[in-house]
Image: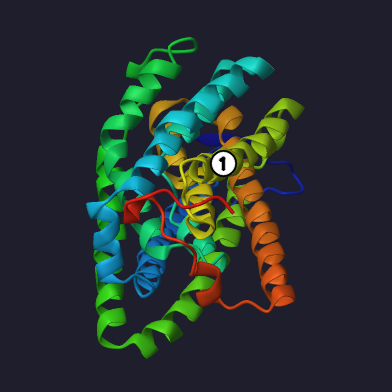
Amino acid sequence: MSIFIERTAEFASCPSEATICSGVNCLVPTSDFNAKLSLALSIVLTFMLALIMFTMGCAVEVQKLWGHLKRPWGIAIGFLCQFGIMPFIAFALSAAFNVMPAQALVIIILGCCPGGSASNIISYFLDGDMDLSISMTACSTTMALGMMPLSLLIYTSIWTSSDKIQIPYGNIGITLVAILVPITGGMYIQHRWPHLAKKILKIGTITGFSTMIIIIVVGRVLYQTSWDIDLSIWIIGIIYPCLGFGMGFLLARLVGQPWYRCRTIAVETGFQNGQLCNTIIQLSFSPAELELMYAFPVIYSVVQLALSILFVGGYQAYKKYRGLGSDETNSEAPSLEDGYVEQAK
């Protein structure tokens, strides 16, 4: 798209970026800064995701991971939370606040997305079960290939036809590869050189937090006008992740999971893949609709980050107050995955 600007006698020369000049009018192309920034962000995020997953793989032990896959109680609970509870909460909040159709769609699309890789970083700082966290992220991304279309068919029919929403299966597949391949490399490092793996893990977790902040800042630049939205969207953006974290923790505890796995499942439930959500809406909706939709995934991401900082800060303060180490916080009674329900404490 281009715009005409009229030259005056005082400024008679054509702008250097003008493509056509006729008389006092110049045809000047609009800035493609946002498009270039968006492309650069996508490229950077691809490499950063691989780096973060490699780092998280350094915290995974093969035997424990295999144990979760053989007795997938934790994975099953995560599946129920991810593709059962989260889409329903999104639908209920959209209907309760009577938001605009475009805004309701993006809320539900985000609710149907699999967990994001940032959950693995937060689980690490909360002394969660990293093997469970990694397996839940990988499994939810795989299951999203079938569960996302089904969930969207069920919950979006009030506002639009589900055929209008394009599921980027290729992107989901690339995300899955970007998760599994680096994790495998990290697991190999952990198996062969455990001391090196610990150093990589410390560096990678800091990089992961920095990446989340960069995404938020760049997103603010890309869609400046999309922040002029109703108060109800802000309220939903704050309530929704809180409900996700809370419901995940509660359900995990009700079925007898130990505390550190409850923390892991809560984080995996509350964290959603906002990047995938943005890809879906950009493929499926017009620029005018995008202006209404883009802000919500970013608001959700901001709230996720803020809650995570509070959780991690509070948990680390509690550990310091009690004089606990990571091994002590995870040395709890076995759970359903070990064949029986943990006794309530």
Q: What element carries label 1?
A: helix
* Residue at the front extreme, as displayed: 343
Whole-percent x and y of residue 101? 56, 16
* Residue at the top extreme, as displayed: 158
Q: Nearer the viewer, residue 341 or 225?
A: 341
Whole-percent x and y of residue 217? 63, 56
Q: Which of 48 and 270 is in front in this view?
A: 270
- Tell me if 28 is positioned left or right of 6 in this view: left
| Few, some or many residues within 10 Å of mark 1 (<14, 14–19, 20+) | some
Whole-percent x and y of residue 134? 36, 59
- Tell me if 191 is positioned left or right of 263 in this view: left
Q: Which of 328 and 247 is in front in this view?
A: 328
For the question of whether residue 241 can be seen, the reply is yes
Whole-percent x and y of residue 188? 24, 77
Quadrant where the C terminus lies?
bottom right
- Number of dots carrying numbers: 1
For the question of whether residue 24 can be seen, the reply is no
Q: Disc 1 marks which residue? A: 250
Which amino acid, mark 1?
Leu
Q: In this view, does 104 lie above or below 206?
A: above
Q: Nearer the viewer, residue 168 or 12?
A: 168
Color style of the picture: rainbow
Q: In which quarter of the image is residue 79?
A: top left
Q: In this view, does 290 lie above or below 308?
A: above
